[in-house]
Image (spheres, rainbow, N blue to C red):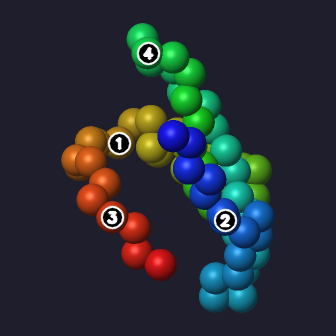
Amino acid sequence: MFKYVDLPLVCGVNGRQWRLYTFDFTTPDGTFSSYFYAISDEHAAALLLDMKQTAELKGSMVGVVK
């Protein structure tokens, strides 16, 4: 069952606006999408590069804090 995630397109942190960005990644099982916040297109590109170089699997989600 698909679950909808409701996130603001823009949020403020310490007086700066952070915009929601999406990215796709491909595995043998298909193409998937995820998202993160960044302050600019350049910042988003840098964050994605860092994620590609340093990402580690930590385990499955057990809940969501609201």
**How far apart are the alpha carbons under marks 3 and 1?**
21 Å
In the image, farthest residue toward the top: 28
Percent across and percent down for residue 10 are 76, 70
Residue type at the position of mark 2: Leu
**How far apart are the alpha carbons under marks 1 and 4?**
19 Å
Q: Secondary structure at mark 4?
A: loop
Percent across and percent down for residue 65 are 40, 75
* Dot 3 or dot 4, earlier in sequence: 4
Q: Is residue 13 above or below residue 47?
A: below
Instruction: Classify mark 1: residues with Cα within 10 Å, few (<14), some (14-19) or many (20+).
Output: few
Report the front residue among 37 and 7: 7
Q: Quickly name the residue at label 1.
A: 55
The answer to whether 61 appears left or right of 1 in the picture is left
- Residue drawn 61% across the image and 31% down it: 24
Question: Which label sits on residue 63?
Answer: 3
Query: Taking the image as drawn, is residue 46 in sight?
Result: no
Which image quadrant is residue 13 in? bottom right
Q: Quickly name the residue at label 4.
A: 29
Q: Nearer the viewer, mark 3 or mark 1?
A: 3
The answer to whether 66 appears left or right of 62 in the picture is right
